[in-house]
Amino acid sequence: MKRACVIGWPVEHSRSPLIHRYWLKQYGIDGAYEKEAVRPEELAQFLGSLEERGYAGCNVTLPHKEAALQAASIADEAARAIGAANTLWLDDSGRLNAGNTDAYGFITNLNAAAPGWNDEGRPVMVLGAGGAARAIVHGLLAEGAAHIMLANRTRGRADALAAAFGPPVTAVDWQQRGSALAGCGLLVNATSLGMTGKDPLDLDLAELPPKAVVADIVYAPLETELLAAARARGNRTVDGLGMLLHQAVPGFARWFGVRPEVSPGLRDHIAASLGEG
Ligand SMILES: NC(=O)c1ccc[n+]([C@@H]2O[C@H](COP(=O)([O-])OP(=O)(O)OC[C@H]3O[C@@H](n4cnc5c(N)ncnc54)[C@H](OP(=O)(O)O)[C@@H]3O)[C@@H](O)[C@H]2O)c1
């Protein structure tokens, strides 16, 4: 039997088991997907014993994403550019490989849900400068975004991210997050604001062109206040659940040997677990 898991500290909140178990059942695979609560000080030992524990690999969630990349023998281009790993697998020689599928998940979902979003090559506004924002900026640049503005509460983190990616990426003040939307073709919320239990995202959309696409990577609630406000004024919207589902695809394919589909049935199943749908 093939086995994989998600590791985190805490890990209880992870939706990954629901996604991967759905696919295991759908494709009739004799496999299992577990949750493993791993303390930061136990990470190296845990990853060193993945094979012994019977795992083909694992997903990695907070706070282990950077350390997981360090622990791997080989890393793919995305994980190196993003500086963090969310998917690990053992290759035929037993070496630990690291990948990052957040950029893939975000872009695949964006292209599916809002085709043509970059047709006019307009500037993109990304709110946030954490790990998710970094992955999204990497994905947007690879997809041909010509100019990305970053607005983050802590300006220094936006400056550092802009410096890491170079001239197509510039930082703007958090206070200018509304006025800088003029002329943008895409707005992405990559902060945790708007998530159930967190502060709301206070953002005036008045300057955002009607043709712009608005994407939120927060998926609980499924329709955030940002997405509801954008939809009400006629902007196309993309929710965070699609990214969560698509980022899971490459890991499942590595561990279980089948490239799974992100189907409406899967989406409904996970949405129901969020109390929606
Ligand atoms: N849909 C998906 O598949 C997916 C994937 C990854 C992450 N996510 C979600 O994306 C969000 C960000 O994840 P992450 O890993 O990037 O987290 P992170 O590294 O902790 O970054 C959090 C970001 O939110 C900002 N922020 C937090 N509280 C704020 C506040 N009160 N006011 C203004 N800004 C605030 C932070 O700004 P500062 O720098 O100023 O602290 C930072 O930019 C989380 O909600 C996570 O669940 C979704």
Image: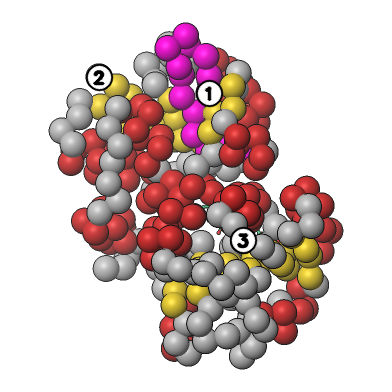
Residue 14 seen anywhere in this rendered image of the structure: no
Distance from the alpha carbon under mark 2 to that under mark 1: 21 Å
Residue 155 seen anywhere in this rendered image of the structure: yes
The local crowd at label 1, few if under 14, some if 14 to 19, many if 20 or more residues have their Cα within 10 Å, is: many
Distance from the alpha carbon under mark 2 to that under mark 3: 43 Å
Above or below: residue 124 compared with residue 68: below
The amino acid sitting under disc 3 is: Ala
Residue 111 horizontal/vertical position (percent) = 43, 60
Above or below: residue 127 compared with residue 132: below
Q: Nearer the viewer, residue 102 or 121?
A: 121
Residue 233 horizontal/vertical position (percent) = 48, 90
Residue 85 painted magenta: yes
Distance from the alpha carbon under mark 1 to that under mark 3: 29 Å
Give the mark nearest the N terminus, 1 or 3: 1
The residue where tag 1 is placed is 97
- Residue 25 lies left or right of residue 14; in this view the side is left
Q: Quadrant of the N terminus?
A: top left
Give the mark nearest the N terminus, 2 or 1: 2
Q: Nearer the viewer, residue 119 or 247?
A: 119
* Contact, mark 1 vs mark 3 (Cβ under 8 Å): no
Tell me the magenta residue range.
Answer: 84-97
Quadrant of the image occupied by residue 208: bottom right
Quadrant of the image occupied by residue 23: top left
The amino acid sitting under disc 1 is: Asn
Label 1 or label 3, whichever lies nearer to me, is: 3
The residue where tag 2 is placed is 1
Residue 241 painted magenta: no
Above or below: residue 186 compared with residue 190: below
Label 2 or label 3, whichever lies nearer to me, is: 3
Q: Quadrant of the C terminus?
A: bottom left
The residue where tag 3 is placed is 145
